Image: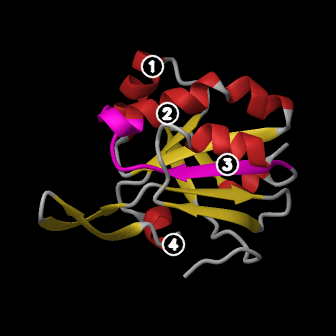
Amino acid sequence: MLTTGMMAPAFTLQDRTGKTVSLSDFLGKKVVLYFYPKDNTPGCTRQACAFAGLYNAFRNKGVEVIGISKDSVASHEKFAEKYELPFVLLADPERTAIEAYGVWQEKKQYGKVSMGVVRTTFLVDENGMIVRIMPKVNPDTNAAEILAELE
């Protein structure tokens, strides 16, 4: 299980254009790394749009925002275009980063138990160290809470 003070697990995934992106590409910058269940679902769309709305404020603080789900590159491209998302979306269909960060968990919905991504946000510092973990975040307030914490 990941805890604050640990090095963030390294990963290399494809963004919405198919370009390979690694966490190490962002050394020297703080990174908000948020894991979400699925493109184009109500909660995930609200969360992505909230990060998009505050994206310039994050950038002004030198912070990069990265969203990761198990959706495909093509799904991310459509999602980003539809909602004009300016930040990096990474496709993790093999769940490499999702499992490394411990967000693939048992979920209960309407009495049904299944495995899936538990909406979780990590704040990673300039050296690649995890400085904050926010499990089971509210998609409507997550972006603003992280931004307030960076003040």
| Quarter that holds the N terminus | bottom right
Residue sitting at x 40%, y 31%? 45
> Tag 1's secondary structure?
helix
Is 69 magenta? The answer is no
Where is 144 relative to 103, above or below? Answer: above
> Looking at the picture, which amino acid does disc 4 mark?
Ala
Q: Pick out the residue farthest to the bottom.
A: 1
Mark 1 lies on residue: 83
Of marks 2 and 4, the one in the foreground: 2
Give the residue at mark 4: 100
Residue nearer the viewer, 151 or 36 = 151
Q: Quadrant of the C terminus?
A: top right
Which residue is identified by label 3?
32
Sooner in the amino-acid sequence: mark 2 or mark 1? 2
Q: Nearer the viewer, mark 3 or mark 4?
A: 3
Q: CA distance from mark 3 to mark 4?
A: 16 Å
Name the residue located 30 percent from the left edge and 62 percent from the top edge: 116
What segment carries the magenta color? Answer: 29-44
Residue 77 shown left or right of residue 108 in the figure: right
Type of the residue with mark 2: Ala
Mark 4 and mark 2 in contact (Cβ < 8 Å)? no
Query: Residue flagged by tag 1: what amino acid is it?
Result: Tyr
Task: Count neighbours of disc 1 (C-alpha within 10 A) and say few if under 14, some if 14 to 19, many if 20 or more.
Answer: some
Q: The disc labelled 3 sits on which kind of residue? A: Val
